[in-house]
Amino acid sequence: MIPALAPLFTGPLAPYADALGLAPQDAGSEPATALLDPEMLNRRLDQFARRFTQPERRAVASLWAKHHFSNVLTPVIAANLMLGRDLPVALAETRLIADAGGATRTLILPHAGTPVSTGAERFRPLMEGHLRPLITAVAKTSGVGPKVLWSNFGNLFENIVHTATQMKLPAAQDGLALMAARRLPDGTANPLFEPIRRTAEGRTRRVCCVRYLMAELDYCTTCPLERP
């Protein structure tokens, strides 16, 4: 556990205490930029695919990304919103440890973070340094659409922001504002625009995660598609 983040890892976030580590705690780790190498990424996806009896490449990639986002980025978003700490998670700065099944287990950070910016800028380092290059690489390697992968992260992000809103954390407003904006401050399209729609019936993703392409899996509980 990173001592500066200890206040996070109680209650629902307790299982994430070992998802982040600090250099030089990097035994068995490799540069996170290895995920940008098609050969290495394909190897990881091949390992991850072994847990399914009839793997479909796009669905495998989507589910691998879901696991990566959920496992190592949940505490990153929580630290941003709850502790006001911007963690250094750019792929170029970090190392990672994968499990035997190809899934990312731990992200090794160069330091314990700095105070966040405000507004949409508070999420920019995460989006541009980690998400955008990784999503581009996974989409190119597997054939799954980038919008699917951004939606996977958006589903996680919206859920954490919603929790922060219920906790009445002021920082949650920055997360809500980001998801309400069609464009980022630089004028480019916002890949996190309205990732989730909440109604009286529950939460629905705007973009399907394509897990249903795997014969052994059903539609997820937030799927926007009409079931056959």
Image (cartoon, rainbow, N blue to C red):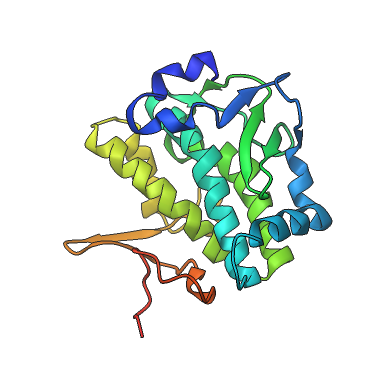
Left or right: 121, with 13 as reference point: right
Residue 203, located in which quarter of the rendered image?
bottom left
Q: Residue at x 66, y 28 (%)?
A: 108
Residue nearest the observer in this picture, 224 or 186:
224
Quadrant assignment for the N terminus: top right
Task: List the single residue furthest toward the bottom.
Answer: 228
Residue 129 placement (x, y as % from top left):
65, 41
Total marks shown come to: 0
Q: Residue at x 44, y 32 (%)?
A: 15
Residue 92, located in which quarter of the rendered image?
top right
Residue 27 placement (x, y as % from top left):
75, 25
Left or right: 73, with 9 as reference point: right
In the rendered view, tell whether residue 207 sits above or below residue 103: below
Q: Is residue 48 visible?
A: yes
Task: List the single residue furthest toward the left.
Answer: 200
Q: Residue at x 76, y 51 (%)?
A: 36
